Amino acid sequence: MSDTDEGSELPPTPLDSLGIMASQQAMLNDHLRHIEMYTKRGLLSLLWHEPHGVARPIGVVMLGGAMGGLMGPGDSLYHALAEELVGRGVPSIRLSYRTANDMDSCCMDAAAAIQMLVASGADNVVVMGHSFGGAVAIRVGVGLNQMVAGVVTFATQSAGCEVAGGLQGTPLLMFHGDQDSILPLEASEVVRAIAGYGDLQVMVGDGHLLTNSHDVMYETVLNWIEQLNSGEAA
């Protein structure tokens, strides 16, 4: 059978599935690239932090909540992490969804970002998400298990995380405020129970945006990623 025969075609990649009609990009500084991809289902916008020289084996994808966004919880935690990580040789992509709060579409966006990092040289990727984005991170971590080195959630919802058992031991780090009035701490506890494991860090006195926990999350996530890069994280 020739490679043009029916049945021999490879399935579409996440980037193929986006149906990109046009794209443009610009360098915002010497290590930050802004990419916009125009698709029939909306605009996918990426901030790609690219280290100079040899990159570390793990990349990072950062996902917002049900309203989208690029900054993350805490005090613009995603921006702070990306700036520090790029200096350590770790590439990262901050992603603004095409259609926020659409689970299937957002998962495809995240998968496309993972594909881009792996194609650029990352061995695998850490996926992190806040609130609704936590469920996206969980689902992509299951669906692309061989490409995902770890999952981080911040005040995740439990809806959409019913598949968390499929993480199959992929390192899972979770943060949740015990005063969260939007998604209670029990949401993360449920997800951890479904997964069967996970390091759940309770941020005492903090709410959904985890504003008071920025420093703790920043240091914990950086150390955790360093352990993954060195092969020490469980």
Image (cartoon, rainbow, N blue to C red):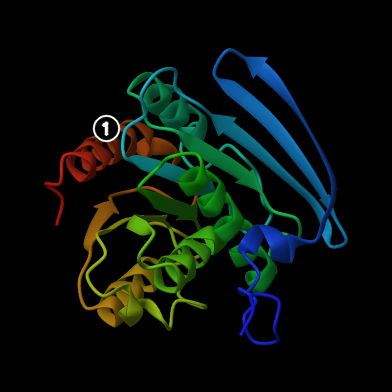
Decide if residue 76 is on the left or right side of residue 1. left
Decide if residue 184 is on the left or right side of residue 12. left
| Mark 1 Cα-neighbour bin, 10 Å: few <14, some 14–19, many ≥20 | few
Decide if residue 171 is on the left or right side of residue 48. left
Quarter of the C terminus within the rendering: bottom left
Is residue 102 or residue 43 the one in the foreground?
43
For image coordinates 44% across by 67% down, the residue present is: 144
Q: Provide residue 222's location: percent of width, then percent of height.
A: 28, 34
In the figure, 33 relative to 203: above or below? above
Q: Amino acid at mark 1?
A: Glu
For image coordinates 50% across by 26% down, the residue present is: 50
In the figure, 27 relative to 191: above or below? above
Q: Provide residue 54's location: percent of width, then percent of height.
A: 36, 24
Q: Report the number of discs.
A: 1
Q: Provide residue 96's location: percent of width, then percent of height.
A: 67, 46
Q: Provide residue 145's location: percent of width, then percent of height.
A: 37, 68
- Name the residue at the front extreme: 1
- From this viewpoint, is residue 32 visible? yes
For image coordinates 28% across by 50% down, the residue present is: 204
In the figure, 50 relative to 189: above or below? above
Q: Secondary structure at mark 1?
A: helix
Disc 1 designates what residue?
219
For image coordinates 64% across by 87% down, the residue present is: 7
Quarter of the N terminus within the rendering: bottom right
- From this viewpoint, is residue 178 visible? no
